[in-house]
Amino acid sequence: MFIYPPIPLLATETTANLGPMILAGVLLSLIIIYLASKLGGEISRALNLPPVLGELVGGVVVGASALHLLVFPESGATATDSVLMSFLQLVAGLTPEAVPEVFNTQSEVISVLAEIGVIILLFEIGLESDIRELKEVGYQAAIVAVVGVVAPFTAGTVGLMLLFNVSTIPAIFAGAALTATSIGITSKVLSELGYLKSKEGQIIVGAAVIDDVLGIIVLAVVASLAKTGTVDVVNVIYLIVSATVFLLGSIFLGKFFNKSFMAVSDLLQTRGKLVIPALIFAFFMAFMANVIQLEAILGAFAAGLVLDETDKRKELDQQVVPIADILVPIFFVSVGAKVNLGVLNPFVPENRAGLIIATFLIVVAIIGKLITGWTVTGQEKINRLAIGFGMIPRGEVGLVFAGIGSASGVLSQSLEAAIIVMVILTTFIAPPLLRFAFKEPSETAEKLPNADTAN
């Protein structure tokens, strides 16, 4: 354990000499993050809710909305807002002159770790997204997915611009956040109810897989647009084409790459012989996506889809899970910590516009997905209500959109908070709505009591 002398030695020190203090700040931040994620996750699980919601709420509690233990400069906070910095001054002798430098650097380190966390998350989602399932559900799932992306995106973007005078880029970003669907949450509920392998369940899960692919492309496009600050039609077309070619090309070339990957992993004899080459590939794909002006997460997602076709996918998935358990909570808690829900306080007159926007986003989020059930044709007795409800939860995928939007700086505090509220509410209401929809099962919904095959 390091003991720092409580004397003003740091007033004239350089950033390099502040290294121990920066490390101390990072370690304290990680302690706060992991405590918040575990407590929140366990409480959520006890309430039969997705643990990821608990991680988000835990971040809200320790962040700018409540305790100010974890705050970030990009969300408008300063060193004086950080309780953690005050604690370092008290117990470690951090001088007032050094506080801003330590605060900014340790915040940047946590932000980088959060970015790596979301890359690992999308890599894991790619590993869990079985392309072969798409062939089984056919065009019905594709129609549900496309409508589930286009309808809320269009309604959300146009509505924000026309009704609330939101600028084009933030409106597009908020509209994109409405397109997400959490396959993990939906498949878990379907499995618990015994309807995962019903016709409705197959369409929902298949559509959610396609929705993941479309959503990542949409996210890559809007995040890249946010970097330029303008909407260039040619650039939009370039991004859509490049994102599609990159993703599909990666999957196609993956058939040839998989043999080389398996050969390399079989030759290696040291620890991590499977997961380390996989991470090298995932990070390389993320790097390549960045190079061609897309988001790194698209590359990580493509890497997951490619390696999903290997013979050792299940073994690799098991080895990636512990890494995700370490890094992904940093992302979710950081997203929650950066959101100041105080901007939605109805007793403050300036906040009422944000509340109205949040209400609008929630309505669009629900209706935009609910209508997808009625796009299924040729199935007279199918439970369309269940399909629509199954597409509603945004979950961790919606948080990815919010996190990228926050990092890009294009979202105002009220709009970002409104998106987070939309994600939380849609994720909360989807499980009971699905249970309600299957209360009177349709003739096509053949219940399978032991369907525990959800991802």
Image (tube, rainbow, N blue to C red):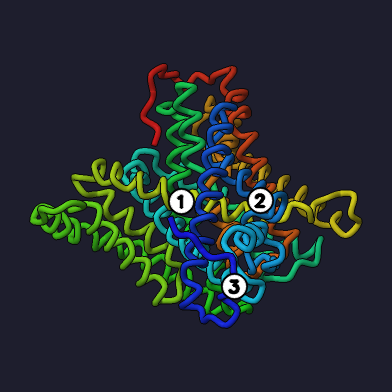
412 left or right of 225?
right
Asked where in the image residue 90 lies, by quadrant, the reply is bottom right
* Number of marks in picture: 3
Q: Amino acid at mark 2?
A: Ile
Q: Which residue is mark 3?
A: 226
Camera-side mark, 1 or 2:
1
Which disc, if any, is residue 420? 2
Residue count near mark 1 (Cα–Cα under 10 Å), binned few <14, some 14–19, many ≥20? many
Q: Amino acid at mark 1?
A: Val
Alpha-carbon span between mark 3 and mark 1: 24 Å
Which disc, if any, is residue 328? 1
Camera-side mark, 3 or 1:
1
Asked where in the image residue 72 lies, by quadrant, the reply is bottom right
Asked where in the image residue 101 lies, by quadrant, the reply is bottom right
Quarter of the image with the C terminus is: top left
Which disc, if any, is residue 318? none
118 left or right of 356?
left
First-in-chain label (1 vs 2): 1
First-in-chain label (3 vs 1): 3
Residue ID at (77%, 47%)? 359
Q: Nearer the viewer, residue 192 or 52?
A: 52
